[in-house]
Image (cartoon, rainbow, N blue to C red):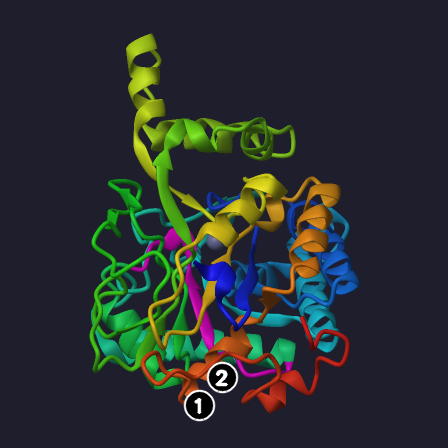
Amino acid sequence: MQNSQLRPRRLSLTVDYEIFGNGTGDVRRHVTEPTERMCRIAEKYGVPVTVFFEVEEYLHFVKHSRELTAELGYDPAGEMRRQAADLANRGHDIQLHLHPQWYEAEREGGEWHLHHHRLTVDALFDNQVETTAYLRERKEALEAISGRPVTVYRAGGFAAQPGARLLGAMADTGLMVGSSVVKGMQRKRPHPLDFRKAPAARRIWRVSDDVAREDPEGRVWEVPVYSKMGRRYQQLTWHRLKAKFSRHVPKARQQEMMDQLGVRKTPGGILSFLAQPVPIKLDYHNLTPGALLRMIRRAPAAPPGDPDVLVLIGHTKEHSNDKEFETFLRQATADPRLKFISMADLAAQLDAGGEPGNGTDLVTGGASGAITSQIPVLVGR
Ligand SMILES: [Zn+2]
């Protein structure tokens, strides 16, 4: 199987960089401090972290900077900005993430009021011109912070579907890669999405009007977060519960998660809930190092000619265990069949013609000279 493959399997370590989707949480505690700890550990092992920076909430922190600084004793936007610039200089990769419910958010009495009926970029405007201008502004805001080209996008809450206007805007603004699909995921609320018919859990495909439907003519690539189907109880480890329901996470957010999951609090309701088939994501904040490595090693080989890359996901606000994170990176980097690649490098390779079908292998430090030349410490893994 993949063990006999000659080329190493590439892993892309991504993290969503944001407070909670309902506007609660604290930037230092849930974003910048855990990110700093994660990136320091990653640097020990030469692993570049791809940070999906939530620009929409950031812009609102900028707008309310004076008020927030008075309230918190620090400026959250300033901290995020300084950290992203610093991480880019240290060889990490800063890419675009948006939760459109933050668009036109208001702040009243120390609380954020978000627009939860608008969860996709498609839902914000009814035409392509405004959608493209919206996305370009956010991409450029992030490039001004990181000093590097931004070429990859991940939808907040995976809510990208269908994505016709989003993908049009991505193609027009040079966001050539999306990583918003989890094969098998389906949800009715808060935003309906259905990735059950996505091409595969681990292929890379071109898209044009739906992120989960292949279009060979599409101008944008979708590189899904790797997942495999399992039963819900398989992901209800102590680990995951701790991450989701620790004191770290606001009570209101915990209740919201229970409501969204639609758990009926009867014995039969709970049992059938636990037995539901769900995609188990390659999520290093929810799986143990052993489970992650098993899943990585057992993932089917990429289709012939496709780059063999698996995208991992995590969330800064769920990072509570430095030790396990380090164990995973130590074991993964000790395996000669595995190598890490940033999403920026992956996008550059795809753009340079590393197209599934022509057999181009992904080599860290290849086509994306502008970016990798900034990664003195991290090349090689
Ligand atoms: Zn997010």
- Disc 1 residue type (three-letter): Ala
Nearer to the camera, 70 or 356: 356
**Which numbered dot is residue 352?**
1
Image: magenta residue range: 147-160
In the picture, the disc for residue 30 is none
Q: Residue 320: percent from the left, percent from the top? A: 68, 40
Label 2, residues with CA under 10 Å away: few <14, some 14-19, many ≥20: many
| Mark 1 surroundings: few (<14), some (14-19) or many (≥20) residues within 10 A | few
From the viewer's perspective, is residue 252 above or below residue 379? above
Q: Is residue 299 left or right of residue 248?
A: left
Residue 22: percent from left, percent from top: 47, 43
Which secondary structure lies at badge 1? loop
Q: Quadrant of residue 226?
A: bottom left
Cα–Cα span, label 1 and label 2: 6 Å
- Which type of secondary structure does the marked residue at label 2 adopt? helix
Identity of the residue drawn at 28% across and 42% down:
187
Give 192 or 11, whichever is nearer the viewer: 11
Residue under label 2, please give it: 348
Q: Quadrant of the C terminus?
A: bottom right
Q: Residue at x 60, y 41 (%)?
A: 290
x%, y% of residue 200? 29, 58
- 376, 170: nearer the viewer: 376
Q: Name the amino acid type tagged 2.
A: Ala
Q: Quadrant of residue 88?
A: bottom right
Do residues under tags 1 and 2 come within 8 Å of each other at their CB atoms? yes
Decide whether residue 250 is among the magenta residues.
no
Q: Is residue 91 left or right of residue 338?
A: right
In the displayed orientation, state which residue is furthest to the front: 4
How far across and how far down the image is residue 27, in percent? 66, 51
**Front-lying residue, 246 or 279:** 279
